[in-house]
Each structure stands twice: as C-alpha cells, then as structure tokens.
Image (spheres, rainbow, N blue to C red):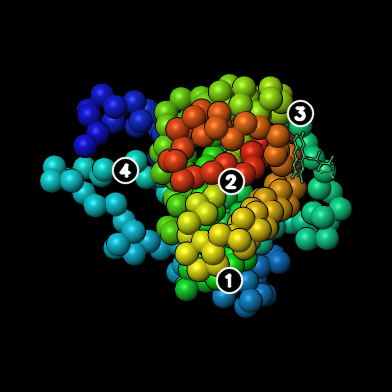
Amino acid sequence: MIQARQRRNLLSAFAFFSLSACAGPRTRQPAPQDTPAATSTREADRTRAAISAAATPTAAETPAPTAAGRMVEQVVALPAPRPQGTLSLEEALVKRRSLRAFAEAPLTPAELGQLLWAAQGITHKAGLRTAPSAGALYPLELYAVTREAAYRYRPQGHQLIAHRHGDLRPALHAAGLLQDSILTAPAVFVIAAVYARTERKYGAERTPRYVHLEAGHAAQGLLLQAVALGLGGVPIGAFYDDQVQRALALPADHAPLYLIPVGRPR
Ligand SMILES: Cc1cc2nc3c(=O)[nH]c(=O)nc-3n(C[C@H](O)[C@H](O)[C@H](O)COP(=O)(O)O)c2cc1C
C-alpha cells in the first residue's frame, strides 16, 4: 500500500494532468465533429466509435480499490485520441526529419496521449492496435519520461500509470551517451520489449526479429504522428541498455529498445 506522504508526492507530480486531462479543459476545445472535414465522413465516425469502445477499460483492467477505498495505482486518464488531423500521411512522410534540438515548452496531455496512441493505441474492440504485432501478442511497453515524472502507457483505457516521480531525463541522458536531444526534449518516449510474450508462440529464434520489427512499426507511427502535430523527434538506438534500465527502474523483463525524444522545433 502506498504511504500517505508518497501518495501526496505522486499526486502533486500529476496535478497538471489531473487538472487538465481528468477534470476536463476549462475552455472548450473544438471536438473532432466541429471540424469541417469530419462532418461528412461516416468512416471517421466509425473509427472514433471503435477507438472509444476499445479504450474503455474492462472491470478486470481497472485498478482495484484497497480496503480503505484508495487506488493502489496512480492512473491518469489521457484525453481521447483524435482519428483525424490536418496533415496528410504523404505530407507527414515528406516532412519527417530527425529533430534533435527542441524548444522548452512541455507537451500537452493531449499531445502525449496522441503520440502514445499512434505507437500502441487500441483501435479495435478485439484489442488490436495502431501498430501490427506478430500473433497480436503485443510485446512492447511504452514509457513517457517528462520533467515531472516517468509514466507507463496502458493502451487499455488509454491511460498513463505513474511509474517514477521526478525528472529522470538527466539519468537517461547519461545512459544515452550524453546525447543532448535526450536532455532537452520535453518528453522522451521509451519503447521497451517483453520478449517472453512473443517467445511463447514463436520460439527463441524468431522472437528477436519479430519484436524488433514491431518496435520499428511503433516508432514510425509515433514519429509521423509527431510531425502531424507540428512536433518532431529522433529515434535513438545508441545507449547502454543496463543503464537505461536502471535509470528508469524498469522491470527486469522490460528491455529498452528505442529512446525517442520529442518536442517542438526550436
Ligand atoms: C535504429 C536507429 C538508431 C538510431 N540511433 C540514433 C542515435 O543514437 N542518435 C541520433 O541522433 N540519431 C539516431 N538515429 C537517427 C538517424 O541518425 C537518422 O534517421 C538518419 O541520420 C537519417 O536522417 P532522418 O531521420 O532525418 O531521415 C537512429 C536511427 C535508427 C533507424
């Protein structure tokens, strides 16, 4: 059970999310249906319905209250992902370039959520996601590391789970060969893999190939989504695995594969 002081720390760390994402925006944001492009597309309505149905956590996925009625996990609901944007896929492909210098401005909860969704969001009631997965076994785990904290993404329910309090980017920067992009990006996404999920079906020989291909799918989705949001990022493979694992206090079976700093162009 989380001690009272620990809980208070977590709560203050996540206050910016609870206020803007959970309690809802103070000024009304245009809903997807307000945009002219969305009004006539039944396909978009169906996509939205599928996302919304798929993103609803089942009872089994909802953290159980403790005897005192408190949640054992700090869960942060993200704003619903938007199935439409202003840039075409072709334009995003043309514009994508690795970006390594960022403005200081933090990402909004909507931007964080949209990027995570593009990498691993659920888009089908059967649990299928934005990125393909061998045998639909989904070995990838995503983390978002910001100035305030590190969060783990839970696709079911489109939620963030508080993982560690505080700014872990300097430790990640050291683990990533002191690459400046890791320190200066307002958010560093980490794609990690649980190989055992895929290995159960595909065995030790095929699994590394499949899992690494999947990390590439997820990373590309995230990077293209960044461009579509007016952001940019860089996929980073040069880091010490064990140091990243320690810096983020990752579970032993979450092997880091990619760091992806993302932010606004400076
Ligand atoms: C597997 C992989 C690992 C990479 N690792 C790094 C890295 O550690 N640091 C970095 O700055 N860029 C890294 N990159 C980005 C490449 O340098 C970049 O994609 C390449 O220069 C082409 O430029 P573009 O992405 O703008 O098209 C990596 C790219 C890939 C695909």
The residue pinned by badge 1 equals: 47
Label 2 close to label 4 by CB (< 8 Å): no
Q: Amino acid at mark 1?
A: Thr
Residue bearing the label numbered 4: 73
- Determine the CA span between mark 2 and mark 4: 21 Å
Considering every residue shown, the one lying at the far left of the view is 67
The crowd level at tag 1 (other Cα within 10 Å; few <14, some 14-19, many 20+) is: some
Q: In 3D space, how far apart are the residues under numbered discs 2 and 1 (Cα atoms)?
A: 25 Å
What residue is shown at x 35% (from left), y 30% (from top)? 10
The residue mark sitting in front, 1 or 4, is 4
Where disc 2 sits, the SS reads strand
In the rendered structure, which disc, 1 or 3, sits on the residue that comes first in sequence?
A: 1
Whether residue 111 is visible: no
Dot 3 amino acid type: Ala
Q: Pick the residue in front: 207 or 91.
A: 207
Q: Does 86 sit above or below residue 182?
A: below
- Do the residues bearing badges 2 and 3 touch, measured as CB atoms within 8 Å? no
Q: Nearer the viewer, mark 1 or mark 3?
A: 3
For residue 101, which numbered disc appears in the image? Answer: 3
Quarter occupied by the N terminus: top left
**Left or right: 130 in relation to 70:** right
* Location of mark 2 (residue): 191
Left or right of residue 22: residue 235: right
Q: Quadrant of ligand 1?
A: top right
